Image: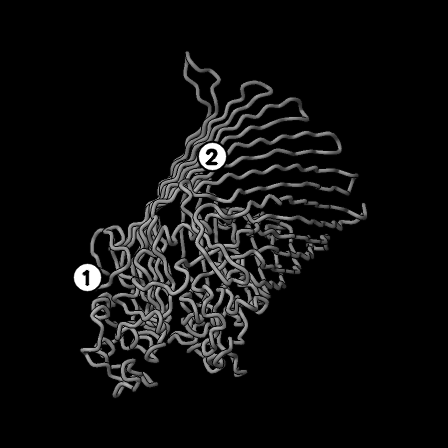
Amino acid sequence: MDNSVFDARSYSITGKETPKQPYNHLTGSFTIGGPIRIPGLIRNGPQFFFTYQRTQINNANTVPGLMPTAAQRSGDLSSFSGSIIDPVTKQPFQNNVIPQDRISPQAKALLSYFPAPNFNGDSHFNYQIPILTASHTDASQSRISKTINAKNQVNGDFAFQRVASDNTNVFGFLDTTRVLGLNGNATWTHRFSQRQSATFRYQYSRLRSRVNPFFANVRNVSGEAGISGNNQDPLYWGPPALNFAGGISALSDGQPLFNRNQTNTFGYSGFWNHSPHSFTFGGDFYRQQLNTLSQQDARGTYIFTGGTTGNDFADFLLGVPGTSTLAFGNADKYYRQSRYDVFITDDWRVRTGLTLNLGVRWDYEAPMNELRDRLVNLKIGPSFSTAEPVIGPTLTPDRAGIQPRIGLAWRPFPASSLVVRAGYGVYRNTSVYSSIVSQMAQQAPLSKSLSVANTEATPLTIANGFNIVPVTVPTTFAVDPNFRIGYAQTWNLSLQRDLPQSLQMTATYAGTKGTRLMQEFLPNTFPSGAVNPCPTCPSGFAYLASNGNSTRESGQIQVRRRLHNGFTANVSYTLAKSIDDAGFSAANPLIAQNWLDLSAERGLSSFDQRHQVAIQGQYTTGMGVGGGMLMSGWRGSLFKEWTVTSGVTLGSGLPLTPIYNLAPPKGTGITGSVRPNFTGAELYLDGDGPFLNKAAFSAPAPGTWGNAGRNSITGPSQFAMNASASRTIRLTDRLNGDIRVDANNLLNHVSYPNWNTIISSAQFGLPTNANQMRRIQTTFRVRF
């Protein structure tokens, strides 16, 4: 058991200190194992093992926000520095005050869910609360094994896990998640001889998860506000999601979900030693079922960009969103997929000091289908001139999954400690289809889907924005029917050598080349201020292809001190660079700014960390003459056998992409891909305020795309220091006590994972949150 007494308070980004909320953790477990023996019935039964663990974790985090003030709620936006334009008269509102009778009744209804500011902040934040999260887990693992005879052995494993978690957002909406998982497998190993064996395996797994949002079956927020067109079945009650380009906290609640996933696996692996070769070979067959009851965006999403009045909150008060997206219907989906793999590996000891590892693997994942063929893709005409919905499986299987691999370990000089290691391999990106088909299943004509911007052809309001009929294609997603599975080629070379003073140095070079990676773009879109080059061409949907690529190269120097007199340490420095023009998952892919110039998306990868230094050390007291081995008496009993470890990691920041506004490219309602122009002004600022200079960016010139590169901002640098101290106390011959103290972020150093990079946001250049502050856990365990 432990609680928050010794933990540091969560760091406040707003500068306003919030009282630390108490919380606690509890972990309890027991384990039993041994041979099963029943007198008179079983003399030499199988070995068994069983363990059960109960974990209760409660945590508190300080969450900031920007909420509308009382004046803003009433229509008084006089604090806004620009002019707010009346969309009716095309003239500025007097003193930037919107008359009460012009405020949308839907906006008034939704404003009631925004809490009032709880402190007098600046333009960045005016609201902050502590949020408690709770998670309870019950888990058990069991194993039984039996050696039938000298040649046959059987094993069985079974695991169970139940997780119940409660999560509250900044608006006080409490969503609950319940997860139940089962996993079991059985293996039979037969030894033909000491040099040859075969293992057969069957595995079954099932995972059930349910998410129950705050408003589900409780309150029809959309209906009460006078919003129509979205799903207002009781299970999906709640507000539409509201996003603001200016930085006001986004109103949202979770989506209901009920998933039942199941996988059956049959596998075989064999071993054959034929000196100097050791062969391993085999294959697997997987049959996967994903049964889902969920909607992609049942209540819909409105984004307010300021495109109508010049101010995003004024757009909201007048009930005029900048974009509207929606996807619901066809809620129950039954996905099915088969996967296969075959492999063979030869561990070949060529001679003393030289070993080769040669292998090849073939993977094939059949495109995932829906049991009732309820998938929708688009049949695309030449140059995206047409797009027609097609129902049913449309993806071409990709069977080119051959992956050769080779490894080498070589000691070139028998009298030297120098060891050379090298390797090359091809690795296929498996399990890519599930997120793709989940988007294909939530589209017209089987579902109601739209992604539109506010234009003269599609005028949006909060009341009817989900009833708009798109002027082009009513689907929001399409995938290349010849989509191919991505793969990575990796290679490495390392040199290792012993040095004096128990030191060992290793120098490593590693490279990766990714091919056929996911790339998503918005066909027939154009920059703001340009003339639509093809008014009759379809738009309003994202298109996923597999034409992306990536490269990563890194060099590392590592010096390790072997354990000597109780002390061991490791220091490493890594220099790396990663570049790509693609995303790495269909659930969160990269969407290109200009669909006609995909090469402009080539930039630093989102995970590119140029520099990293890692230092780890461990010291055990009472080892060696100089370390106190001869110390006796009470001093020796108190000092000896403590093990202290510490680790420090320092790294440069990860790349971030500047976003001009949440306004979408013309021709679609999909936001987040338009980048600003770079003015040449100094980008980074010192001090405690915003860390990025807004003057370094400007709006793209009319008719052009922004020239700021993707991932052209370097995020905050990273620092972490953890430590622990532990000791085993021998109480009696059969009774031991273990004591351990762990400290995360030992120095209580403030660090941030990223910054806000939306140029129009009030939080631009500020961290979105802080990493965890110091946390201390003390554990005492008795073993008997």
218 displayed left or right of 16: left
For label 2, the crowd category at 10 Å Cα-Cα, with few meaning under 14, some 14 to 19 and many 20 or more, is some
Are the residues tagged 2 and 1 within 8 Å (C-beta)? no
Q: Residue at x 62, y 64 (%)?
A: 577
Task: Estimate the spatial distance between the alpha carbons at disc 2 and disc 1, rounded to whole Å.
Answer: 46 Å
The residue wearing badge 2 is 264
The residue wearing badge 1 is 224
Q: Residue at x 42, y 38 (%)?
A: 262
For label 1, the crowd category at 10 Å Cα-Cα, with few meaning under 14, some 14 to 19 and many 20 or more, is some
The image position of residue 258, as x and y in percent, is 33, 45
Which callout, 2 or 1, points to the residue nearer the camera? 1
Q: Nearer the viewer, residue 318 or 490?
A: 318
The image position of residue 645, as x and y in percent, is 52, 54
Amino acid type indicated by mark 1:
Glu
In the figure, residue 162 lies in which quadrant?
Answer: top left
**Furthest residue in direction top, as rendered:** 40
